[in-house]
Amino acid sequence: MASDSQFPTGSSDLDDHPPRHCGDQGGQLASLWHTILLVAILVLASANGSRIRHPLAAHGKLTVYVWTICWEWILLGITWLGIRKRIGLRRLVGGRWNKLEDFFRDLGIAAGFWLVALLVLGTGAKVLHLDQAGKLESMRRSLGFLTPASGLELAVWLVVSVNAGFCEEVLFRGYLQRQFGALTGSMFAGVLLSAAVFGASHGYEGAARMFLIGIFGFLFGLLSWWRKSLRPGMIAHAWHDAVSGAMLRMLK
């Protein structure tokens, strides 16, 4: 990823600690131990996901949604604690929209990316035979605890989707991708490693879909690397999750 001098910046104190180029030696965004701890939390939470969610699911989907939002902000808080002395969140995201046309440009990029990603994911699902009727039914049942069943649940699911678009892109493509790039000296390796962790953090979806989600994360990584910003990925991520929830509700 290019140096942060290429990112649009504001005048906020969030920008007081610009990092060095992520591929340069010593350009880490946080300590190695912080990265190891965060990855361990993600993997352990994924491995124990069913045990965490079942008691909550008994209290209804809204409880699951609220917990999901809180959990992602907890992870974002852990990320911020590690990076706060070296880079601000605004710089990590890639600045802000200065003009309306900047927003529409990123919106167009996000839409184009999403269509390409759907094609790639659809091809991957066919190769992994995830498009078969039995596999689709299994997926529908396994994700039943997340599927909106009412208008209120769908509205809150949209909030969950927007929250995931922001928090997960900051965590995986903003922090981990750049951190892995700095640690390995290769931003392509950073994209691959962050995608692997992204897939591994979705253990509740099963091994085959974890692999497919890893490919999805790889595409998001390439997008943020090319765009030098997380904003198009945030839009596409939120949109994808929102549409997925709505589609699953239609299939109920």
Image: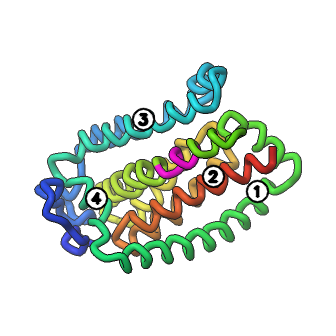
Q: Amino acid at mark 1?
A: Leu
Identify the residue position indicated by label 2 in the image.
211
Q: CA distance from mark 1 to mark 4?
A: 35 Å
Residue at 21% of width from left, 54% of height from top? 88
Residue 206 shows in this picture? no
Identify the residue position indicated by label 1 in the image.
128
Element type at marker 4?
Answer: helix
Tell me if residue 18 is in the magenta stretch.
no
Identify the residue position indicated by label 4 in the image.
92
Residues marked 2 and 1 touching at CB (< 8 Å): yes
Q: Earlier in the sequence, mark 1 or mark 3?
A: 3
Element type at marker 1?
Answer: loop
Q: CA distance from mark 3 to mark 4?
A: 22 Å
Along the viewing direction, whichever of 164 and 227 lies nearer the viewer: 164
Identify the residue position indicated by label 3 in the image.
40
Image location of residue 129, percent across then percent down: 81, 56
Q: Amino acid at mark 3?
A: Ala
Q: CA distance from mark 3 to mark 2?
A: 18 Å
Q: CA distance from mark 2 to mark 1?
A: 10 Å
Q: Earlier in the sequence, mark 1 or mark 4?
A: 4
